[in-house]
Structures are given as C-alpha cells and as structure tokens.
Amino acid sequence: MNFTLLTNRIILIATLVLFGFTAWFFSDIVAYLLIAAGIWFVLTPLVNFLDYTGYKGKSLPRWAATLLAMIIFMGVLIGAGSFFIPLVIEQAS
C-alpha cells in the first residue's frame, strides 16, 4: 500500500516536470494558445447570442455570427486603441 502511494507520487512529479519542461520549451506557442483561448472565451457568448437570436424567425448562420463577432471585437480594440494611445503619447511627452 505504501509502495503504491510512493509510485503514484513519483509518476505525478515526473508528469509535472515533463509538462513544465514542455511548456517552457514551447513557450511561444503556449502564449499564442493562451491568447487565442482568451479571445475565444470573450467572443463565445456574443457568437451564441447572434446565432440564437433571430429576426422574424430567421437567424444568422454560425459562420456569419462568428465573422460579425470578430468584426465587433476588432472595432472595440481599434476604438479603445484610438482613444488611449493619444493619451499615452501626450503623457509621455
């Protein structure tokens, strides 16, 4: 019984070390995956809303709802950037 507990802990530690090394080795890819997951997390409710909300019994296809959500997201990012970047430049000078 004690041997099984020790074996399980060794396997867990080895798995964590292997996972940590892999995440460090592929850190650039992991960063892109985390950014993509964040964008997906933000846009999924908007896509679902656009997909299931209809007008006169018709709703957008999933691809159109996704495209519209991405356009809205980019518009919000560009709008926020065009608002904050001049303020940062003014404060820097």
Image (cartoon, helix red, strand yellow):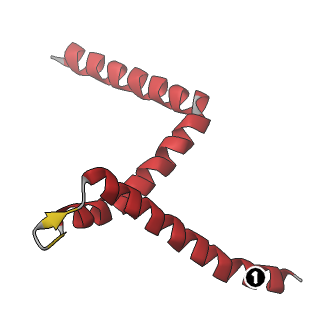
- In-front residue for pair 41/18: 41
Task: Identify whether 2 is placed above or below 23.
Answer: above
Q: Residue at x 19, y 63 (%)?
A: 59
Callout 1 environment at 10 Å: few (<14), some (14 to 19), or many (20+)? few
The x and y percentages for residue 44 are 31, 58
Residue type at mark 1 is: Pro
Q: Is residue 42 left or right of residue 74?
A: left
Left or right: residue 40 compared with residue 85: left
Which residue is found at the position 59% from the left and 77% from the top? 80
Q: Quadrant of residue 91?
A: bottom right
- Residue 83 falls left or right of residue 34: right
52 sits left or right of 15 in the view: left
Query: Residue shown at 31%/66% (left/top)?
Result: 46
**For this rendering, which residue is in front, 10 or 42?**
42
Taking the spot 74% from the left edge, 85% from the top edge, the residue there is 87
Residue 11 position by quadrant: top left
Front-lying residue, 74 or 2? 74
Which residue ends up furthest to the right in the rendered image? 93
Q: Tell me: residue 88, above or below residue 39.
A: below
Numbered marks: total: 1
Q: Is residue 73 above or below residue 33?
A: below
The residue tagged 1 is 86
Helix, strand or loop at mark 1: helix
Against 8, residue 29 (above or below) is below
The picture places residue 66, in percent across and down from the top left corner, at: 35, 56
